[in-house]
Amino acid sequence: MRRSTVALPALAVCSALLVSACGTRSEAGATPGGAAAGETTVVIGFDGPLTGDLSALAIGAKNAAQLAVDQANKNKSVPGVKFALKSLDDQGQPGTGQQNATALTGDKQVLGVVGPLNSGVAKSMQMIFETAKLAVVSPATTSPGLTQGDNWAKGTKERRFTTYFRTATTDAVQGPFAAQHMHDTLKLTKVFVVDDKKAYGAGLAATFTDEFKKRGGQVVDTDQINSGEKDFSSVINKIKSSGAQFVYYGGEYPDAGPLTGQLKKAGVKIPLVGGDGIADANFVKLAGGGATGDYCTTVGAPLEEGAAGKTFAAAYKAAAFKDPYGAYGGYAYDSATTLVEAVKAVVAANGGKVPADARAKVTEAVQKVAFDGVTGKVSFDEFGDTTNKQLTVNQVKDGAWAPVTSGTFTAK
């Protein structure tokens, strides 16, 4: 049976971006002005680490979601509905994220949420959203277990949370994609694996390790760090004597930057490789000149290679946000657009009105959404995962991340 879709052609996305490129925005994160007479206010929540070490990733994502909301209002994407964005800061902490989930579900106007960015935070929020039947579309969480259950790696996949979706592909392919590139393309066969003990970092390191071994690579040693450490001399000494040709790091840029910087200062001139959690300009800055030649993988193809991505970048610039959209901006924009399209379908099916059971209906509509977004095709499989499996390898060149190659993971 053919699955029904909520279609939005790529041209429509480009047109929407162009129409609203010079639209107004609110620094506070809420759409300016209240609903006009006869309009219903629908709130889209946003959750992410807006303060703290990872704020550079979250602020750009929040701004991109705001851009999508502003455009939906300017273009009257859903007649009779005024959208607003409600942004909450989880500080990258599961406990705070759980509190935010309770606050968002407690607001009856909230019909969907963009976020969170951290897999560990997402895990603490999922049951709250599920109980409230509130759809969540994350632009960044990549831990496979969030959608496929704890036994996904053993081949037993189970979707426990029907309200959880994501526009970013998972570490089930991101880690192996890195292993494929380092072993098959660069012909590097010896790696030292380090992770930060967190859900994202440890999970990513595990999927990389499994695939690297399958391809004939050797993991010469492993170690873990505590996030927030300042002195990495202990692990660096182990790497130095290991004979590794590169380091694979599962974690995020606040620790990865100093680690690779100290590694190079110690005379270990081998690249550090990581996932999308290190794909930020701050990684290069924190490395203090030691990041040149390092690699990272990111989900999707480079945003500005496609027409819709270029138009998004131009619209974001025209909106005059103070911070760049970052690694997850395009995905946050597509996540917010997904919720707008779902609300549109639900309202249209209910005679132009928001129904009493709108949250449950929006969740059902998200599952059926399909459109050409700024990051590529946006649609979801039976687990709520994106059907877009494109990935990119990037390398630090001339003081900045630059794409090297894009493609998909090919199982050995």
Image (spheres, rainbow, N blue to C red):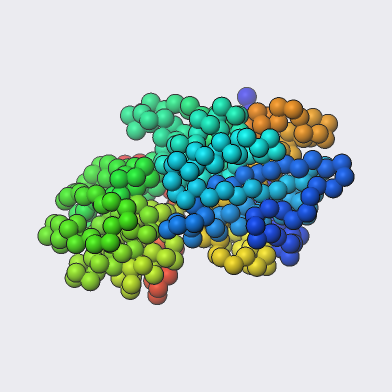
Residue situated in front as seen by the camera: 159 or 130? 130
Count of labels in the image? 0
Q: Residue at x 20, y 49 (%)?
A: 222
**Relative to residue 400, is residue 65 drawn left or right?**
right
Can the viewer see residue 303 in this picture? Answer: no
- Residue furthest to the left: 241
In the picture, residue 308 is in which quadrant? bottom right
Q: Residue 346: x, y in percent?
A: 73, 33
Q: Residue at x 39, y 47 (%)?
A: 174
Q: Is residue 373 above or below residue 25?
A: above
Q: Residue 53: x, y in percent?
A: 42, 58
- Residue furthest to the right: 37
Q: Residue at x 40, y 73 (%)?
A: 399
Can the viewer see residue 24 in this picture? Answer: yes
Residue situated in front as seen by the camera: 363 or 12? 363
Q: Residue 275: x, y in percent?
A: 38, 53
In the picture, residue 62 is in which quadrant? bottom right
Residue situated in front as seen by the camera: 307 or 279? 279
Which quadrant: the N terminus? top right
Residue situated in front as seen by the camera: 408 or 312? 312
**Relative to residue 6, is residue 56 drawn left or right?**
left
Q: Is residue 253 above or below residue 322?
A: above
Q: Residue at x 62, y 35 (%)?
A: 106
Q: Residue 101: x, y in percent?
A: 55, 38
Which quadrant: the C terminus? top left
